[in-house]
Image (tube, rainbow, N blue to C red):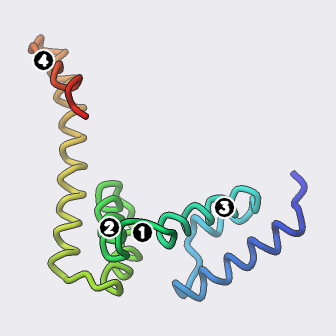
């Protein structure tokens, strides 16, 4: 695919800003920048989520990101989001609670999947009708 020179220029500016912010360029960005057309859109979404006009304050947004990174085993993301949460005013205990919540949700997701298969295998009746009422 032929690269648009204007998109390359924009992507390079985004990379420079990322390097200034983090002191390095994350692997995700290193790879995605090879396709400026996609990288620019992804970067704009990231900016909107974390810096846009949102109802959540920065501390809460970064605690959510810590929790999600913990749930998804985001080895590198969790460190970055923890630092951002701390910079936004999160305490050591708040960050630990966010990690604990994410880990708990991930454990429940694994149990939910595995125990459904277990119930199927061993003929255990389950009532999932409650799912229709969850909003």
- Front position in the image: 52 or 74: 52
Q: Nearer the viewer, residue 32 or 90?
A: 90
According to the image, label 2 marks what residue?
Answer: 66
Classed neighbour count for the residue bearing mark 3: other residues with Cα under 10 Å, few (<14), some (14–19), many (≥20) = some
Residue that sits furthest to the left in the current view: 124
Given this view, does label 3 or label 4 mark the residue nearer the observer? 4
Q: Is residue 38 left or right of residue 125?
A: right
Label at residue 77: 1
Which residue is more in the foreground, 111 or 45?
A: 45
The answer to whether marks 2 and 4 mark residues whose Cβ atoms lie closer than 8 Å is no
Is 8 on the left or on the right of 67, as rendered?
A: right
At numbered mark 3, what does the secondary structure look like: helix, strand or loop? helix
The reply to whether the C-beta atoms of the residues labelled 1 and 4 are less than 8 Å apart is no
Mark 1 and mark 3 in contact? Answer it, CB < 8 Å.
Answer: no
Residue 56 position in % (x across, y down): 35, 67
Residue 112 on image: x %, y %: 20, 34
The image position of residue 133, as x and y in percent, is 20, 26
Q: Classify mark 1: residues with Cα within 10 Å, few (<14), some (14-19) or many (20+).
A: some
Q: Residue at x 65, y 63 (%)?
A: 31
Q: Which residue is mark 3?
A: 32
Q: Residue at x 38, y 80 (%)?
A: 84
Which corner quadrant of the image does residue 132 belong to? top left
* Quadrant location, the C terminus: top left
Which residue in the structure is indicated by mark 4?
127
């Amino acid at each position: 695919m032929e690269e648009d020179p204007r998109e390359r220029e924009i992507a390079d500016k985004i990379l420079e800003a990322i390097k200034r912010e983090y002191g390095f360029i994350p692997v995700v960005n290193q790879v995605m920048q090879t396709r400026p057309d996609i990288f620019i859109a992804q970067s704009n979404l990231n900016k909107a989520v974390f810096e846009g006009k949102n109802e959540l304050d920065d501390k809460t947004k970064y605690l959510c990101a810590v929790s999600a990174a913990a749930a998804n085993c985001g080895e590198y993301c969790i460190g970055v989001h923890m630092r951002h949460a701390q910079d936004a005013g999160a305490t050591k205990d708040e960050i630990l609670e966010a990690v604990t919540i994410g880990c708990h949700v991930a454990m429940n997701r694994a149990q939910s999947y595995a125990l459904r298969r277990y119930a199927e295998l061993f003929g255990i009746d389950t009532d999932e009708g409650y799912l229709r009422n969850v909003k």
